[in-house]
Image (cartoon, rainbow, N blue to C red):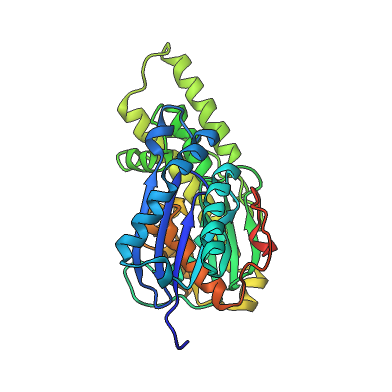
Amino acid sequence: MDKKIICLGIESSCDETSAAVVDSERNILSHVIYSQIPEHQKYGGVVPELAARAHILVLDDVIRRALADAGAGISDLDVIAATAGPGLIGGVLVGWMGAVGIAQSTGKPLVAVNHLEGHALVPRLKNGGTDAAVEFPYLLLLASGGHTQILLVNGVGKYEMIGQTLDDSAGEAFDKVAKMLGLGYPGGPVVEKRAAGGDAARFGFPRPLCDKPGCDFSFSGIKTAARTLLEKEKATNDQRPMTNDFVNDFCASFQAAVVDCILNRVGNAMRDPRVIAAAPRMIVVAGGVAKNAAIRGGIERLAAEHGMEYGAPPLNLCTDNGAMIAWAGIENYLAGRVVAGPVAPRPRWPLTEL
């Protein structure tokens, strides 16, 4: 590649409005995120209508700040990229139409990025604190608030599903259990924090599918078990408030069950004939749930046991962000995957349909 490519990436699929400027040499020139968490905490989760309205109010300013922080003008950009799905369709539409307006008014090429591909490719932008590039093919655990999947990443737009959740995602299970305990939103970070001071052996949560072959996940049974245990606790203690020790032990036991399920399914994936045939050198974990230290550590140990390398983006690139969209835009642009006509944003858009 003779010329360095500079891309503006826009992300608005859920409750973060983000824009970033990234170049093809893997430099993040700017990165701005407006988080809506304070707006949604009182409701215990994301309210789609409020999220879309917030994106409308802040998107222009977020983009202007990203360009200013990068010391770049629109004329310095080579490509515009934005999330076109999957996600909350109101928010997706806000970011996508913003990108379309910029592209049409400037004549810049436009890339419609699958949000999940942003997560899948961001380890190639930044792999932890190292400068080592993640090379294709690699095995990917993508764990987020909406998805839990194991994929073979064979190239840009080339994904093979090895396993996926049959019901809830791991992130949803964390959020629902946090809500049951009155710990607030988002649930994953606070459950992890409370689990650090708890006894993971106190409560016997189920490990769905761990005694069965295959690579698919199921987290609804763990969530149901949590509700049943909590109802029993309240009935036994005459509705008195839960003690700190109870909450800590509950979180530790719940997290241990989720981690065991993930490691069991990923271990099966490493022995899957499709994975063996592809011979990936590295396993990568990405997505918002990949911030969880127990999951990251477990996957790293599993990789070592199977003679594989381990990779993960830095923590600030695990949750939804514009930098991953800008990088996916660059990768797709270099592969010739640019918008040639009207694009309808999609609330659902499997990676295997790229």
Q: Nearer the viewer, residue 229 or 25?
A: 25
At a point 61% along the width and 50% down the height, the residue shown is: 217
The answer to whether residue 204 shows anywhere in this view is no
In screen coordinates, is 274 left or right of 69?
right
Q: Nearer the viewer, residue 255 or 319?
A: 319
At a point 42% along the width and 53% down the height, the residue shown is: 18
At a point 40% along the width and 59% down the height, the residue shown is: 317
At a point 62% along the width and 49% down the height, the residue shown is: 165
Measured as percent of width and height from the top left, residue 339 is found at 63, 67
In screen coordinates, is 340 left or right of 281?
right
How many numbered tags mark residues here? 0
- With respect to residue 159, does 45 lie above or below? above
The answer to whether residue 38 shows anywhere in this view is yes
Measured as percent of width and height from the top left, residue 33 is found at 37, 51
The image quadrant where one finds the C terminus is: bottom right
Q: Nearer the viewer, residue 306 or 300?
A: 300
Q: Residue furthest toward the top?
A: 238
Q: Residue furthest toward the bottom?
A: 2
- With respect to residue 123, does 116 lie above or below? above
Measured as percent of width and height from the top left, residue 333 is found at 55, 74
Measured as percent of width and height from the top left, residue 184 is found at 40, 31
Q: Nearer the viewer, residue 188 or 342?
A: 342
Image quadrant assignment for residue 76: bottom left
Q: Residue furthest toward the front?
A: 105
